[in-house]
Image: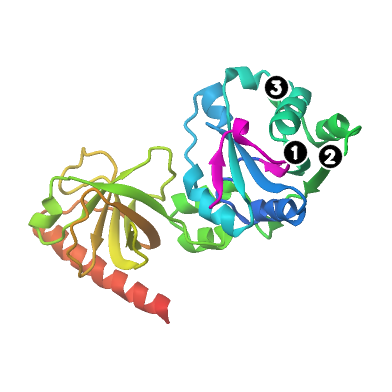
Amino acid sequence: MISLISPSEIKNSTSIAIGSFDGLHAGHRKLIKSVVEENQHTPTIASFWPHPREVLYKEMRLRLDLPYEKLPILEDLGIEQLVLIPFDKELSKLSAERFVRDILINQLQAKNISVGANFKFGFRRSGDINTIKNTIKDTDIKLKITPILEDKEGRISSSRIRNLLEKSDLKKAFKMLNRPYSFNGKVVKGKEIGKSIGWPTANLEIDGRKFLPGEGVYAAWATIENSNQKIESIMNLGSQPTINPSSPSAVEVHLINKDIDLYGLNLYVEPVEKLRSQIQFKSIDQLSNQIKKDRDNALRIFKNNKK
């Protein structure tokens, strides 16, 4: 299995790419390919954790992929280790030249460095590809520069994918990610109101650093931990406008035609298509009738996807 390690745990010389790699979209994959193709050294990805803007500007940066979620994807792409560089105020003051020498060369033992054409780094983002070129010019280290990847709508980026997910455009997000978007959470005790009206739901405790799609009701695949079976489901993402309008946003999943005790287990959720926005109904009966319609619409979507 691919390793998730700190810089101090690097043991072999590396062919390395550095960046956030959030979403592992087509642009990231092109950069990763250049690392893997250089097969004399250990193919490695390095990312800062937490995100520099969280440390410097107290901005909460929600991730398309948390580090542990990247591991199986990176492994399939041929990467052997993911290095998380602890980012703090001290590191932020390191000059770009010292970052190349102290971190990339000395700590991460880089023999091949791959970066995107717009890569910026070091104190106040003062370093770029020319900084790397000048710092390694008297060494045997190679530098590969990957051009920015674009499609007819512009630069392929994590920000575009977030915007698509926020608009619940899962099909376009799928196309840019080259895989379904998904998340997971531990099933925790709720108020069991869904169960009392005939629609039991699993209430998920989601990592607060994970980016989630726009609020609404979705057709979704659900997979229980240690299982490969995808279960047809409907998911409510957001508050409970009928039950408790003041409740915080939450993720609830109803497994269609399944009655399984999920408490304490992780549930993996793959939203397929948004069914509707959230609505405040006048009664519990109206809510229950709408959930039945949601279930029927979701089953039609699953049936069409299988064709």
State the mark number for residue 110.
Answer: 1
Q: Position of residue 233 (x, y in %)?
A: 29, 64
Spatial separation of the CA atoms under disc 2 and disc 1: 7 Å
Q: Secondary structure at mark 1?
A: strand
Q: Position of residue 34 (x, y in %)?
A: 75, 53
Residue wearing tag 2: 141
Q: Secondary structure at mark 3?
A: helix
Q: How is the image coloured?
A: rainbow
Tag nearer the camera, 3 or 1: 1
The residue located at (84%, 43%) in the rendering is: 142
Q: Is residue 280 magenta?
A: no
Q: Is residue 51 left or right of residue 138?
A: left
Compare residues 26 and 49 and report the one nearer the observer: 49
Residue that protrudes farthest toward the right in the picture: 138
Q: Residues within 10 Å of mark 1 (few under 14, many from 20)?
A: many
> Of the residues under marks 2 and 3, which one precedes in the sequence?
3
